[in-house]
Amino acid sequence: MTDSSLATTPLSLALVGNPNCGKTALFNRLTGSRQKVANYAGATVERKEGFFVLPSGRHARVLDLPGAYSLNATSPDEAVTRDVCLGQHPAEQQPDLLLCVADATNLRLHLRFVLELKRLGRPMVLALNMADAAERRGIRIDKLALERELGLPVIETVAVRKRGASALIEALDGHLPAAPAPLPENADLHAETRRLIDATVSMPNLTNPVDAAIDRWVLHPVVGLAILAIVMLVVFQSVYAWAGPFSDGIEAGMGWLGEQVGAHMPEGLLHSLIVDGVIAGVGGVLVFLPQILILFFFILVLEESGYLPRAAFLLDRFMVGAGLSGRAFIPMLSSFACAIPGIMATRSIPNPRDRFLTILVAPMMTCSARLPVYALLIGAFIPERSVAGIFNLQGLTLFALYMAGIAGALIVAWVARLMRGKNTEEQALMMEIPAWRLPNPNDVLLGLKERGMIFVRRAGTLILALSILLWFLSTFPSPPEGATGPAIDYSFAGRIGHALAFFFEPIGFNWQICVALIPGLAAREVAVAGLASVYAIAGADEANTEQLLSTALSNQWTLATAFALLAWYVFAPQCIATLSVVRRETSSWRATAIWAGLLTGLAYGAAFLTYHITAALT
């Protein structure tokens, strides 16, 4: 291929490597914000691709493949990586170049996968990532000797530095390297890895002394659990305490927007649609964006630092006692943000039984879409009071709701384990504990931007559409002539709510709550907009705000009703999107129906007990 044709032909790269090798950090360094995330068609494995331009002007497309330890796939994630590398994936063409990423501080583990990829006979480049960390530990890698032994270019990178990938970009800007000579099929990859390490790497210590010192405390069976409990408490306290000023700013901005728009529109249906339907509905959900971003921030920091695999290792014996694996910790923690990526993360669990149980209980974690409901009810019914001089009572209440979800999930898993009998395929937890590292601010900010935009897009599409639908149901039909009751009673929403109230009355729900639960099936956070729409049309004459709704609820609901609704949302059936993912992951409508029925029954039972106990005590 000539130089001119090279410049006009896009280069297709596939980033491949073991988990925890810094592959995603290198992907972010190469592509910046020019990336998009989706799922492969018909599957929930994440598909992440980005784009950048080489110095010559040639465009490059980068596919960030799921981390894998071997091409002999033991999980759906590894199967996707294998199929793309082999050119057998139905939705991906075989890449022009395999950009294999290895952790320079842990080549003894990562080189074996490099040798396995070399067998494919495809053009390859090896990126020795975290080269700076290897240098600080006194690890010396003879790069030229490693190039010669492997028969492919070897380039050092530091993905967390601004120009840490410049040498790699320059190496990619030209003709592709020749495919390395493949190893014989009967070659012992472990023996070959040991030979390469002995010939090219000088390592004074097998482990980092600083990491070992930290792990003595973090992985201690008693102290480590105390540290984990403190970390989780700080996270949930911060979600509630730090978000206040930002939420107030968004609320004030949406209120001002509603006033400005309303002042320039004549009274009538269009005025009501725009102000009470669109602005109030969407604004009532956007006000909780700061809390969701704070939660994502902590999850990203814990993931980037290397703490999450340690927490999984620490909790393994408790998970096993409940019938789960320590590997279930990361999917369950991911479900605190959203149940969908939590279910997706179960694809790294090799044991089918453990994977199914994790899919069953991971959505019981308190996803971020519940936060708007929790924040609204806690703000309305729990006083903002200091506890022991350091804790906030509202934050402790939020922490208790999260803990209730965790306890419920473990109990359900334990019961399922008793019902299914002993797991004959139970496997010991085997996972890599990565080195401790400071989270890269660029990667954290990119992750926050990606998740924030997903939430904002939901607010601008699904939540907007549902807010308009709620406005329509709450506005039409108009009350008949001579009607004396509130207009909402005669609307479609009022009729639906009154019809459902018979079923929900035993748990203390009024018909307004029943109306709000319906759009909550599409997106949980829309329940807040539903309540705002119903109560605004039922009696409010001004643009609705969180404070107005909070005041209305505290005046019209009993404490027992509020607590019952909180208990309902601890176990409530998931949104439709999560149901569809469960169906795809289990390939069974029967399993999905059982799962949804179980959650509905748990939610109803928890709300029933909470309502009647609280009513008796208060």
Image: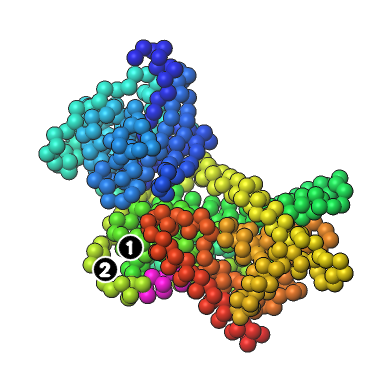
Q: Which stretch did the figure color magenta?
A: 408-415
Position of residue 402 measured from the top left corner of the image (x, y, whole percent): 52, 67
Q: At 26% across and 62% down in the image, what residue appears?
A: 428
Label 1 sits on a secondary structure element that is helix
Q: Quadrant of residue 251?
A: bottom right
Label 2 sits on a secondary structure element that is loop
Residue at the far bottom in the pictured view: 616
Q: Main secondary structure of the magenta part?
A: helix
Note whether residue 318 is visible: no
Note whether residue 572 is visible: yes
Answer with left or right where residue 520 lies relative to residue 1: right
Are the two marked residues, 2 and 1, in contact with CB atoms closer than 8 angstroms?
A: yes
Q: Is residue 283 above or below residue 386?
A: above
Q: Quadrant of the N terminus?
A: top left
Q: At 43% across and 62% down in the image, what residue appears?
A: 592
Comparing 465 with 614, the one in front is: 465
Position of residue 528 measured from the top left corner of the image (x, y, whole percent): 66, 61
In reply to whether residue 267 is colored magenta, the answer given is no
Q: Quadrant of residue 27?
A: top left
Residue 354 numbered mark, or none? 1
Position of residue 395 measured from the top left corner of the image (x, y, whole percent): 60, 67
Residue 423 numbered mark, or none? 2
Residue 485 numbered mark, or none? none
In reply to whether residue 413 is colored magenta, the answer given is yes
